[in-house]
Image (cartoon, helix red, strand yellow):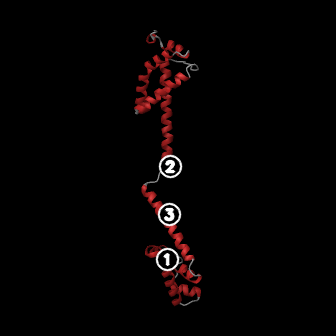
């Protein structure tokens, strides 16, 4: 059996390019630990460092016949691993940038949103019921609650007595209170 440990890096590379599995294993044994330590010092994550070095050796085997080594194999290995580490840092920077840009709602924000949706639905239902009031009663109600007119101003606007305005408002509120119950009725008084 051939003792690959006595071969130089250049001899190992020549054998690697020819598809020699044992030459590849020798290269792996020579450089894996050194590359792993280097990657770990930069990344501070054992699993990620191991993945980077494993990925390098996988690509080295797959592209073995097309690789050109202009410098020493150790320089090539460290440069290739360093480039992968730089890619990881750049990817993390982009990921962090977009993670900061896209904010995820907190539980409080979700609760507020849910509350606003429910409030909007309730207000739409209230508006629908106000629309169902008789025309004159609805006009008086809207002038009072939405336009904040006084009973005297409403009476002057519609050319009716204040007593009629009061009676129509009482009837409108009674209808709405009956329709909605106390809680929604209070919402009508507060919101409208």
**Local crowd size for mark 3, using a 10 Å CA cut-off: few (<14), some (14–19), many (≥20):** few
Q: Is residue 150 visible?
A: no
**Mark 3 vs 2, N-terminal side:** 2
Answer above or below: position of 41 versus 136.
above
Answer above or below: position of 164 versus 49.
below
- Residue 65 placement, left or right of 93: right
Q: Is residue 36 visible?
A: yes
**Mark 2 vs 1, N-terminal side:** 2
Q: Residue furthest top?
A: 1
- Write down the quadrant of residue 153 in the picture: bottom right
**x and y, in percent, of residue 154 in the image:** 55, 84
- Residue 34 placement, left or right of 83: left
Identify the residue at image location x=54%, y=77%.
147
Nearer the observer: mark 3 or 2; the answer is 3
**Mark 3 vs 1, N-terminal side:** 3
* Disc 2: which residue: 102
What number is the disc on residue 96?
Answer: none
Q: Nearer the viewer, residue 100 or 133?
A: 133
Q: Nearer the viewer, residue 39 or 185?
A: 185
**x and y, in percent, of residue 172 in the image:** 51, 81
What number is the disc on residue 179?
Answer: 1
Identify the residue at image location x=54%, y=69%.
124
């Amino acid at each position: 059996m051939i003792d690959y440990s006595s071969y130089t890096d250049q001899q190992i590379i020549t054998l690697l390019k020819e598809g020699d599995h044992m030459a590849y294993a020798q290269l792996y044994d020579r450089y894996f630990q050194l590359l792993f330590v280097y990657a770990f010092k930069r990344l501070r994550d054992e699993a990620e460092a191991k993945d980077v070095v494993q990925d390098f050796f996988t690509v080295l085997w797959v592209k073995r016949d097309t690789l050109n080594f202009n410098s020493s194999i150790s320089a090539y290995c460290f440069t290739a691993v360093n480039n992968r580490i730089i890619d990881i840092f750049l990817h993390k920077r982009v990921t962090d940038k977009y993670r900061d840009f896209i904010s995820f709602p907190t539980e409080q924000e979700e609760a507020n949103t849910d509350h606003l949706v429910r409030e909007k639905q309730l207000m739409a239902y209230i508006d629908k019921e106000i629309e169902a009031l008789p025309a004159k009663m609805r006009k008086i109600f809207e002038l009072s609650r939405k336009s904040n007119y006084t009973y005297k101003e409403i009476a002057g606007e519609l050319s009716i007595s204040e007593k009629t305005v009061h009676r129509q408002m009482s009837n409108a509120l009674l209808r709405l209170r009956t329709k909605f119950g106390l809680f929604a009725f209070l919402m009508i008084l507060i919101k409208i």
